[in-house]
Amino acid sequence: MREDIPAGPSAYRQVYLLDYLMRLRQEKTRGLLLDMGEANVIRMAAFIDGHLSCQDANGIKDEEYRRFFQWLRDVKHELPGEGWDVKYLRDCDGDHERAIRKFLDFAAEFVALRERERQGC
């Protein structure tokens, strides 16, 4: 174990998925260059699944992302059984960057809605 890295689960700041997605959305680079390489809906969906699996394996419950997932399904009707990735890619005529942007825009809408709710508006 490296000595320069603090030990224990509380030693690190947890990065919740919606926070990370909002940071991705703010990126202005052409092609939405993600840490995972080219803008690709399949990679994005796999990244999200992996992030959630890692959180679960470490006992982190990302309830806000779960609320977003439910909102996307129940309120926006934008989460079909085939998955957001398949639907959005089809909706965006095969344009991976647009499909990812659509997903991130829904995430931003949800985050803004939750913030208004917290402020009592």
Image: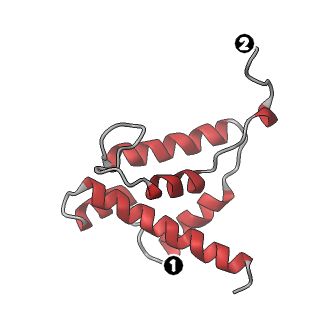
Residue 117 image point, x, y percent: 69, 79
- Residue at position x 41%, y 71% from top? 78
Q: Nearer the viewer, residue 42 or 36?
A: 36
Q: At 22% from the left edge and 57% from the top edge, which residue is drawn?
A: 95
Q: Is residue 3 above or below residue 88?
A: above
At label 1, the amino acid type is: Val
Q: Is residue 117 left or right of residue 77?
A: right
| Residue pointed to by mark 2 | 1
Q: Position of residue 53 (x, y in %)?
A: 57, 40
Residue at image point 51% right, 40% down: 50
- Mark yes or no: residue 82 visible: no
Residue 2, percent from left and from top: 71, 14
Q: Quadrant of residue 10?
A: top right
Dot 1: within a 10 Å radius of its alpha carbon, few (fewer than 14), some, or many (20 or more) residues? Answer: few
Q: On residue 16, which mark appears? A: none
Coloration mode: secondary structure
Residue 12, picture quadrant = top right
Q: Nearer the viewer, mark 2 or mark 1?
A: 2
Query: In which quadrant of the rendered image does the N terminus lie?
Result: top right
- Asked whether the viewer can see residue 39, the reply is yes
Residue 65 location in percent, x, y? 60, 58
Q: CA distance from mark 2 to mark 1?
A: 46 Å
Is 54 positioned to the left or the right of 59 in the image? left
Give neighbour class at mark 2: few <14, some 14-19, many 20+ (Cα, 10 Å).
few
Image mark for residue 75? 1
| Secondary structure of residue under mark 1 | loop
Q: Is residue 12 found left or right of 51 in the rendered image?
A: right
Identify which amino acid the numbered label 2 is placed on. Answer: Met
Quadrant (top left/top right/bottom left/bottom right) for the C terminus: bottom right
